[in-house]
Amino acid sequence: MFIGHFDVGFATRRFAPWSSEAVLRNAPLLADVLWPVFLLLGSEQVRIDPGNTRFTRFDLVSYPWSHSLLMPGTIAIWIGVVSHGMLDWITHRADMGLWNSIAGTIVVEFRMLAVGVWMYMGATRAKDRIGFYAFIGYIVLLMVLYIGDRFSVARGSVGEIVWPGIAAPFIVILSASWFDRHRCIRGELA
């Protein structure tokens, strides 16, 4: 699960309208933000296994720290963190189904994105052009990253996923924080 975690971040805005978008966005991503760090430290393990599932080449051998459900936070943040575990539970292993269907995975995640974006747009409105165009650009960026990652050249080692996995969350979270500062809660004066 990748893009589905962003969807939960968008959707929680409706329930926590004055919370920072960066915090709401990071909550469902927190496990994946921590995961490459724990891989780098050797506390968690992943193997590159081209036959693991049809969608991903990762065999998630051990990830007890980054994906634990003991992450604290507010209700909206807690929902985001719990959603990560639930969404990953549906997809991560071959016997759970979704990652064995490339089309099914893409359809489910894009539908989730549509719902999350719809909920976010229902809770906020652009204060200026940046709030509108940067938000649209962000959605396009997420889709390009998602499709690009899925159809890119296979990574041959764990090291090739660690550094992009550490850098990418900062880029997408800072981007979300930037466009969100140019949006306001619906009904609120700009």
Image: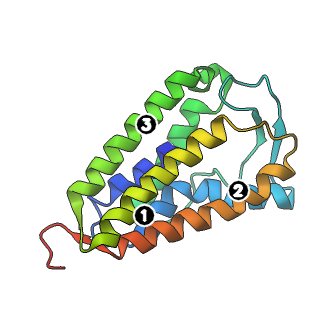
Q: Name the residue under label 1.
A: 24
Camera-near label (3 vs 1) is 3
Q: How crowded is mark 2: few (under 14 residues within 10 Å), some or many (20 or more)?
A: some
Residue 105 showing in the rendered view: yes
Query: Going from the N terminus, do you reach mark 3 or mark 2 first?
Result: 3
Could you tell me the amino acid type at mark 1?
Leu
Q: How crowded is mark 1: few (under 14 residues within 10 Å), some or many (20 or more)?
A: many
Residue 79 showing in the rendered view: no
Query: Going from the N terminus, do you reach mark 1 or mark 2 first?
Result: 1
Residue 23 appears at what percent x and percent y?
A: 46, 69
User: Residue 188, relative to residue 162: is it above or below?
Assistant: below
Could you tell me the amino acid type at mark 2?
Gly
Could you tell me the amino acid type at mark 3?
Phe
Q: Name the residue under label 2.
A: 165
Query: Going from the N terminus, do you reach mark 3 or mark 1 first?
Result: 1
Residue 175 appears at what percent x and percent y?
A: 49, 68
Residue 163 appears at what percent x and percent y?
A: 77, 60
**What label does residue 110 carry, if any?**
3
SS of the residue at dot 3?
helix
In the foreground, 46 or 167: 167
Q: From the viewer's perspective, is 53 left or right of 128?
A: right
SS of the residue at dot 2?
helix
Residue 128 appears at what percent x and percent y?
A: 26, 74
* Residue found 71% across the figure and 55% down from its top: 35
In which quadrant is the N terminus drawn?
top right
Q: From the viewer's perspective, is 182 left or right of 153?
A: left
Distance Cα–Cα, label 3 vs label 1? 19 Å
* Residue found 15% across the figure and 75% down from its top: 188
Q: Which residue is most to the bottom? A: 190
